[in-house]
Image: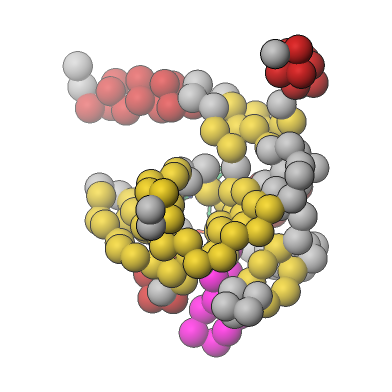
Amino acid sequence: MSNEENQQLFKEAMGNYPTGVTVVTTTDHEGKPVGLTVNSFASVSLDPLMILWSIDHKASSIHTFKESAKFAVHLLAEDQQELVKQFSSRDVDRFSKVKWGFSDNHLPVIEDAFAVFECETFQTVEAGDHTILIGSVINITTEKKNPLLYHRRHIGAIPSEFYAQLDKE
Ligand SMILES: Cc1cc2nc3c(=O)[nH]c(=O)nc-3n(C[C@H](O)[C@H](O)[C@H](O)COP(=O)(O)O)c2cc1C
């Protein structure tokens, strides 16, 4: 099987694997906020608290994230669909339409996510065409909101029937 065929199968399988959606932010060397939409986020360790995500070598912010030594992961809520496009589109001021401010750790934090993990970069690992960033979690905030779902390139809320089923259990 050719590499191209395998890549196609890989894309099909991963596209059919549902995830949540996050926006990861940091500041550049001028102190300006930068951020991008990310679904490669995963939990790593409970003691100590660690998470990971991976960034494409082609992303404009890759050097900023590798140099900044800290970042904030926003786990998006079901009413934050607009942010997914906003933070993955080029040539837009990504922070212009969102409410955000600097945290005590001087990280750009966007309002209304269901959780925000502020992290110090613990390790970066080069892996193929991406760099994996492993973060030590230094601050957590949460809100009681439902998450946003990313599945088959579609973004939306988890259907209410799913929650109705949970309530019966
Ligand atoms: C749902 C979704 C998930 C994404 N996940 C990632 C990811 O995990 N890592 C990554 O590097 N890019 C990811 N992207 C793409 C980036 O958000 C986007 O390519 C990037 O922001 C491009 O703009 P830039 O090069 O100007 O930063 C994702 C995009 C979408 C819509």
Considering depth in this image, is 59 or 108 the residue closer to the camera?
108
Picture coordinates of residue 94, whole percent (x, y): 68, 63
* Highlighted range, magenta: 26-35
In this figure, what is the number of numbered marks? 0
47 shown above or below 63? above
| Image quadrant in which you'd find residue 24 | bottom right
**Residue drawn at (54%, 70%), measured in percent from left and top?**
26
Q: Is residue 88 visible?
A: no
**Residue drawn at (59%, 27%), measured in percent from left and top?**
151
**Residue drawn at (74%, 69%), measured in percent from left and top?**
100
Q: Is 28 a magenta residue? A: yes
Considering depth in this image, is 45 or 73 the residue closer to the camera?
45
Q: Is 65 a magenta residue? A: no
Rendered-image quadrant of the N terminus: top left
**Residue drawn at (34%, 54%), measured in percent from left and top?**
132
Considering depth in this image, is 104 or 12 the residue closer to the camera?
104
Picture coordinates of residue 29, whole percent (x, y): 49, 84
Q: Is residue 99 visible?
A: yes
Q: Is residue 116 left or right of residue 9?
A: right
Q: Is residue 22 left or right of residue 1?
A: right
